[in-house]
Amino acid sequence: GEDVEQSLFLSVREGDSSVINCTYTDSSSTYLYWYKQEPGAGLQLLTYIFSNMDMKQDQRLTVLLNKKDKHLSLRIADTQTGDSAIYFCAVGWSNNDMRFGAGTRLTVKP
Amino acid sequence: DAMVIQNPRYQVTQFGKPVTLSCSQTLNHNVMYWYQQKSSQAPKLLFHYYDKDFNNEADTPDNFQSRRPNTSFCFLDIRSPGLGDAAMYLCATSRVGTNEQFFGPGTRLTVL
């Protein structure tokens, strides 16, 4: 089955950039996603990228995809304390199937 | 606002006592999913419905069942909860062809 790997923790200072990394194994995936989960809440879709794209930017968020290395990253510019949450990488296929990584807990220190 | 609603948000049950979790949606999406998420782990897909067609993941225990009486509602039934079934249960919906899933806030299940 598909493996989606993320580092479990990341700590940054307020105002710095955060970079959360993800690797996956199935190159046939069609979509790659980043979800955010705040304590006690469900998952909120932040952004996604099609597998034929290299980069997508949406305000403070930049997604980079290296399909050759099966590496996905999420950069959050000017990280704020409100960005503290768990960030999940997910890989999806056109049949609506999806697999999640274990999540990276981002802590933003003032 | 169109949304995915889960009730209750917190559910406590006893070991072996059947429990039902509820999900409803106002998005009119034809696909509905149930995920199990244990602490510090990835959400794990249990099953999904494509309209009324039920799709079970191969490793979902028989203890877990689901019903979808109409487009808006989907239920997760745990027939005999064990201590290992304590988790957050997430419902999600999507429209076929978009592959964007919208999640509810989850139901946290405690088994005593």
Image (cartoon, coloured by chain):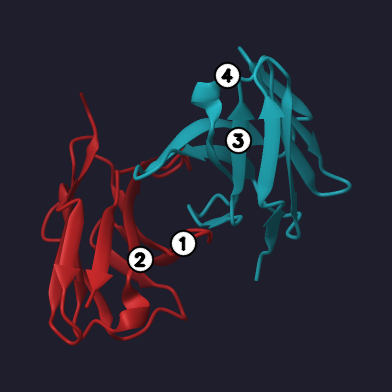
Chain colours: A cyan, B red
Q: Please state, as top left, top right, bottom left or bottom right, where the N terminus of chain B lies in the image.
A: top left
State yes or no: discs 4 and 3 in contact (Cβ < 8 Å): no
Identified by mark 1, the residue type is Ser
- Label 2, label 3: how many angstroms apart (C-alpha)? 23 Å
| SS state under label 2 | strand
Q: Disc 3 and disc 1: Cα gap in Å? A: 17 Å
Please tell me if label 4 and label 3 are on a single chain. yes
Q: For the residue carrying disc 1, how many other residues have a C-alpha within 10 Å: few (<14), some (14-19), or many (20+)? A: few
Q: How far apart are marks 2 and 1 (CA)?
A: 7 Å
User: Mark 2 or mark 1, which has the lower sequence index?
Assistant: 1
Name the secondary structure under disc 3. strand
Residue at 64% x, 46% y: name it.
A30
The residue lying toward the viewer, choosing from A25 and B98, is A25
- Quadrant where the C terminus of chain B is found in the figure: bottom left
Residue A107: percent from left, percent from top: 60, 35
Residue linked to disc 4: A80
Q: Mark 3 points at which residue?
A: A107
Disc 2 residue type (three-letter): Ala
A29 relative position to A103: left or right: right
- In this figure, which residue is indicated by the disc labeled 1? B39
Q: Alpha carbon of mark 4 to alpha carbon of mark 3: how far?
A: 10 Å
**Rendered view: A5 above or below B94:** below
Secondary structure at badge 4 equals loop
Residue at the disc numbered 2:
B87
User: Could you tell me residue B73's position as x and y percent?
Assistant: 15, 52
Label 4: chain?
A: A
Residues under numbered marks 2 and 1 in contact, where contact means CB atoms less than 8 Å apart: yes
**Cα distance in 3D space between marks 2 and 4:** 29 Å
Return the chain for callout 3: A
